[in-house]
Image (cartoon, rainbow, N blue to C red):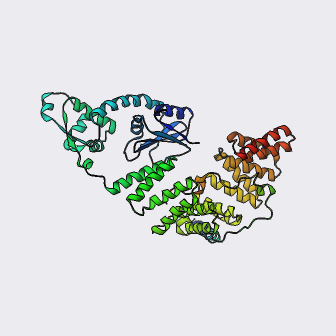
Amino acid sequence: MADETAEYDDFLTDLQSVVAQRVEELRARQSAETPAAFNDDEKVVRVWPELSGRIMEEFR
Amino acid sequence: MAIRGSLTEASLPDVLQLLAMGKKTGCLGLTYANNFGYIYFADGAISHASIVNRNLSTEEAVYLLFTWTQGTFNFEPGATPDEGVPMHSIDPQSLLLEGARRVDEWALIAKKIPTFDIVYAMDRHRMMAIERELTPEEEKLVPLIDGQRDVSALIAESKLGEFVTAKTLYGLLMTGYMMRVGVSTRARTPARTDDKATEHRNLGVAFYKTGMYEESQREFRRVDALRENDPEASFYLGLVALRQEQWPAAAHAFERYVTQQHTSRPAVFVNLAYAYEQMGEMDRARAAMADALSHGGRGDPLVQTNAAAMAVAARDYETADAALASARTLWGTRRPPPVWFHYAGLAAAMVNDLDRAIALLSEAVQVYPSYAVLWNNLAVAYEARDDFDDALRTLERGLIEDSTLPQLHRNFADSLQRDGRFDEAREAYRRAHTLDAQ
């Protein structure tokens, strides 16, 4: 059980490090296999429409 | 859509009945002079009510709000109370009769007790002369009426609530057991700057939460004037500017927080990143999001979800996937919000993992059926997998939930055309075009 917890913590830490590092150097890594419909802005909604989902309103 | 109005044109009982009948969920904010109160609804029942800077129970707050016959109201759909506040489920109808009775009684009481800073003393001789048994409320209050405490102190110390305390004092005044001896020193001394700032701060937060952004901005500007470099004022002024889509003003407020405060808060950087993103300043947006992660945001699933949203906008789906996986892990057994499902479904679809996209978005529409965006993208994922029947069914369901999204109509039109239903398809394209133009 302790091993599992440690493994989980390690996984999460690795994941968070990857995100932290990559956010600073975001670049298009678009898959060549993207279905055509998902490249069509007339069909797909790309941006979440509610502001409350994109900002943090709690002072923390 | 928010509902606004004047209390002189629609009384609070009318508004309450309307919200109850419509089984509404959200927050009704009320203003009267410099006072602000709010009533939260869940499916038409009152779940919580309060008046800013007053310590009242939900029922007491609603009864007092009934006395506000002037001022404005604003209903913000979907708003829910903060975690930890006492929650109820009260049928508004059950409060109307008692509310109306109290309004009449308050009018009488206010003639004798116009403010809560009046100090009373007992007339012991008169009490001895007229022998009568005290009521339980009088028993509680009489020992506290000492020529020192004002009405506010009597309310606080007796714990009888504003109405019962005032009504009992009114009775004691009318029988001549009690007399006015002055007003409290508190009333004669100007409020301390810090107390005034706290009152404006509380009003500002309440206005913000009920969607009254201009009023919130006014209150936080007052806080800012009273307390130099107040961190919360900068934060809320930034939030108000975001809500008003004034991106440079929002960025300026959050930047001001960052330069003035030593305590870093990831929320400030996330919001700053969003303001920069809207201004098209992507390098600064990325740097602000990196700051959010390095200032305590790594372990916050909302920060990770916002980082993912930014990665999706940059078409960096690998990074988005990592941030979304991190967010979901951080939420543990708690259900992620709809925005997480949106970006998770989108990121999966963009790397052609349609099965995963469909699984995520199917879960999303089960738990958040009112979001047309989720139905729309699920239908597109079905269509991309050549699963046309499921796509059509999903679009029909999405249109029942919300018919204001043009993409839903356009995808519906594509499905109908594919089915050979050309007249219906033409009509659906027309609706998509009309919504696009709005």
> Which one is nearer the viewer's eye here, B290 or B48?
B290
Foreground pick, B291 / B182 = B182
Q: Is residue A38 above or below residue B389?
A: below
Quadrant of the snapshot with the N terminus of chain A: bottom right
Q: Is residue B54 visible?
A: yes
Q: Position of residue B362 (x, y in %)?
A: 70, 49
Report the front residue among B80 and B273.
Answer: B273
Residue B156, percent from left and from top: 30, 44
Q: Residue furthest right?
A: B420
Task: Tell me which corner region of the image, top left, top right, bottom left or bottom right, holds residue B395.
Answer: top right
Q: Quadrant of residue B299?
A: bottom right
Residue in the image at 37% along x and 45% along y: B54
Residue at figure coordinates x 51%, y 62% from the top left:
B253
- Total marks drawn? 0
Q: Is residue A16 above or below residue B37?
A: below
Image-based side of B420 in relation to B112, left or right: right
Q: Of residues B175 and B10, which is closer to you in this image?
A: B10
**Horizontal and vertical percent for residue B357?**
73, 55
Residue A2 in view: no
Residue A52 position in % (x across, y down): 58, 53
